Image: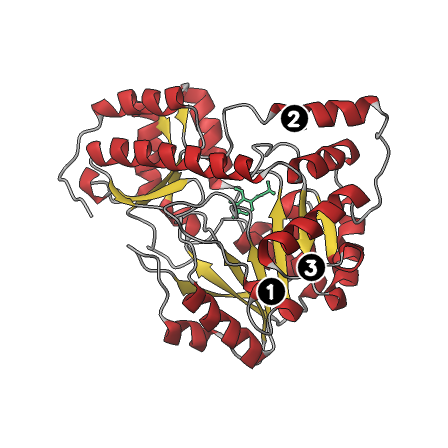
Amino acid sequence: MSKLTGSRKATQFTESVIREMTRLNQMYGGVNLSQGFPDFPAPAAIKDAACEAIRADVNQYAVTWGARPLRDAIAREFTRRYGLPIVADEQVTVCCGSTEAMMATMMAIIDPGDEVVIFEPFYENYGPDAILSGATPRYVTLHEPDWTFDPAQLAAAFNDKTKAIILNTPNNPTGKVFSRDELETIAALCRKWDAIAISDEIYEHIIYDGQQHIPIATLEGMADRTITLNGLSKTYSVTGWRVGWTISPPSLTGAIRKVHDFLTVGAAAPLQEAGAVALGLPDDYYLKLAANYQQRRDVLLEVLTRHHFTVYKPLGAYYIMTDISAFGFDDDVEFARYLVREIGVAAVPGSSFYKTPGAGRTKLRFCFCKRDETIADADKRMERLVPAGVQIH
Ligand SMILES: Cc1ncc(COP(=O)(O)O)c(C=O)c1O
């Protein structure tokens, strides 16, 4: 057999469906409500800080695990918000986005045969992350409309081989914000099975309707077994900067830093300086961010409902999961392609968030991290959508 092939690992997953939708959207000149990046400017203060850092010649490698001002700011802010003391030197590692933070974390803690519990629908990177790190994924379903899990099903997914559970709150794609009770259930299983919680909290500040973000690291007995992931991308509208981080117990930091060093050496030095400025923005910035997104959420919820989608109201993050049964298509990918080609609106097929075959077939995810005009344009284009029936939740 020819050796001119991809590895077994690389053939176990497909290219990102979300990025494919963005490409199709460019081809058909549509409105892109698929990939979660803002189409409005980042805050001027942090753009200025980045330019300043480049001019001041912060242009060489930063310390591999992150420039001190940024690591200090990450530790300071987590402690200030949640009351958990974090030692930057022992616990914070800056990576190239939380994407690399997740990969470095998984490669740092997983051995062949280890199992990792993942909720589905999931952020699409978690599947390939598990394959690349050699973990065996065990999926537990979140059920609409509230995206709750069955505690018995979750308990059944844990065993002696469980090394970690991946948690994402506020959640992409569902908008779910895990409650304290749910987090307690997860934490109890982590303690029982000596497992690690890997908590992706990248939408920490994008939260609605008076909901409260609770980092699982703050629950009893969890600080020593939680790796919290976060980044600049979503909070500061700079998805292209590629700056993220891990906050880990000191016992795991060394392994994460070693893997991170050999994967990427480090994140962009001047953007780390700007990151420290970003984390110092006043509380008002975060309140406005959430209020603005809540307004956009409400607009898109109304638009989608009017165009005959069944919507699941998100309590956090900037996506709306919908049910597309009203349109009479058998297949979500087929419908997503139809929507971008014929109507000119790109969204993400639900099946790309599920491992269970058939799950997600009637779902489609839209994002609303877009200017009012962009959402209005999508609204106008969707006037041509013809339903086969109407369902409202
Ligand atoms: C849940 C979740 N985690 C991580 C990421 C990627 O973040 P970053 O830009 O920091 O790599 C995304 C981006 O969409 C996301 O939705």
* 280 relative position to 170: left or right: right
Q: Distance between the residues labelled 2 and 1?
A: 41 Å
Quadrant field for ligand 1: top right
Q: Distance between the residues labelled 3 and 2?
A: 35 Å
Closer to us: 20 or 366: 366
Decide: marks 2, 1 in contact (CB < 8 A)? Answer: no
Which amino acid type is shown beneath numbered disc 2?
Ala
Quarter of the image where one finds residue 166: bottom right
x, y percent for residue 176: 40, 53
Q: Disc 3, ligand 1: is the CB inside 8 Å?
A: no
Q: Mark 1 points at which residue?
A: 135
Q: Which of marks 3 and 2 is nearer the N terminus?
A: 2
SS class of the residue under badge 3?
helix
Disc number for residue 45: 2
x, y percent for residue 162: 57, 74
Q: Earlier in the sequence, mark 2 or mark 1?
A: 2
**Extreme residue in the left direction:** 389
